[in-house]
Image: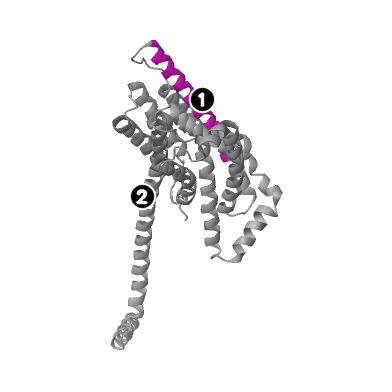
Amino acid sequence: MLQSGNKRQKSEECLSSAFQEAGFMSPACLLHADEDTESYTMVLSSSHSLKLKYVSLGVLVLQTTSLVLTMRYSRTLKEDGPRYLASCAVVSAEVLKILVCTLLVFLENSFSVRAVNQLLKEIVNKPIETMKLAIPAGIYTLQNNLLYVALSNLDAATYQVTYQLKILTTALFSVSMLGKRLDFHQWLSLVTLMAGVTLVQWPTELEGDTVQKFLSAGSQFVGLMAVLMACLSSGFAGVYFEKILKETKQSLWLRNIQLGLFGFVFGVIGMIVYDGQSVNQLGMFQGYNTITCMVVVLQALGGLVIAVVIKYADNILKGFATSLSIIVSTLISYFLLEDFNPTGVFFLGAVLVIAATFLYSYEIKPASSNTIKV
């Protein structure tokens, strides 16, 4: 047995040397090379995935923070001429979203005629499926207008924290409409979230005369009502849209085109009803400047960017993004915009909201039982 083993080893060594003399790698070397290559590929894949996660985190924070801050800055910026109309900005964002999604559909189909046929087939030839999106589109249009109202009356930091109530509304609508079950820690996080937002909105003593206090309190109340309505509409529309996506197999870009078309119609109606006289006098693009254009682009492309990035981001990463957005918005509101004076109650409420975000996103993994087979 020992001799045969030695013979086998010698024959393998001879075969190995013969392969090497011929200029090839030996089978043993090939085997080790394959193992090394596989491990190296796994290392590259994990490092690439890690980079994508960090990029996703950066994009989520940048998109969320930049939209809120630029919108707040654009609504409080003192200008000589008229301020831009929020209803017109919403319509412009819908038009831009439709154009970008149409371009993406053409890219998916390599700019062939098939893309036109797909658009006609899914949008025109299926009116019932298209009409299903009229409800979420109308709600999203209302929500986008409410965000302008909220950020015209609330500072960016308070808005960011309060807007996290959409987690609560989305969870409740998911339970009632999709039959989703929440774990105990998720219900606990929702209670913590409500406590945190309550502390953030807790009234504080303001310096100044009685009239200034009254105006400030009134403005904050209007902003709070706008945020609460936006959270409610966001939760319902998001769950309704998710239900539609689960029932059909259409492209995400096609669905966004359908949403954008209805959003454009509802936006134009709102613009005519509320700002028709101003549009007739000074035009739809009155008060537009570079900041306004940035707001429109961020509002139009923000959701699309998140839709692409979110597949690389897990729940913990989304929690980090929300937390960093709140912190960045607070710092910029205090140091640059100078429209926010933080208090101890606000910080306590913000910490509770951030903790609730992480707690809700936390996934409890079942304990694995190690069985030993005899």
Residue 373, relative to residue 188: is it above or below? Answer: below
Residue at position x 39%, y 38% from top? 70
Task: State yes or no: residue 92 in magenta.
Answer: no
Crowding at label 1, few (<14), some or many (≥20) Cα neighbours within 10 Å? some
Disc 2, SS: helix
* Res 280 seen here: yes
Splitting the image into 4 quarters, where does residue 196 fall? top left
| Residue marked by disc 1 | 225
Secondary structure predominantly adopted by residues drawn in magenta: helix
Tell me which numbered mark, 1 or 2, is placed earlier along the sequence: 2
- The residue where tag 2 is placed is 54
Q: CA distance from mark 1 to mark 2?
A: 35 Å
For image coordinates 70% across by 49% down, the residue present is 127
- The reply, left or right, for residue 152 in relation to residue 242 is left
Give the side of residue 167 with respect to residue 79, left or right.
right
Q: Position of residue 170 (x, y in %)?
A: 54, 35
> Which quarter of the rendering shows the N terminus?
bottom left
Can residue 183 be seen at all in this image of the molecule?
no
* Highlighted magenta segment, given as a residue range: 210-238
Q: Nearer the viewer, residue 7 or 321?
A: 321
Residue type marked 1: Met
Determine the residue positioned at 59% across, 42% down.
263
User: Which percent across, then down, holds residue 173?
Assistant: 59, 34
Q: Please give the label number shown on residue 257.
A: none
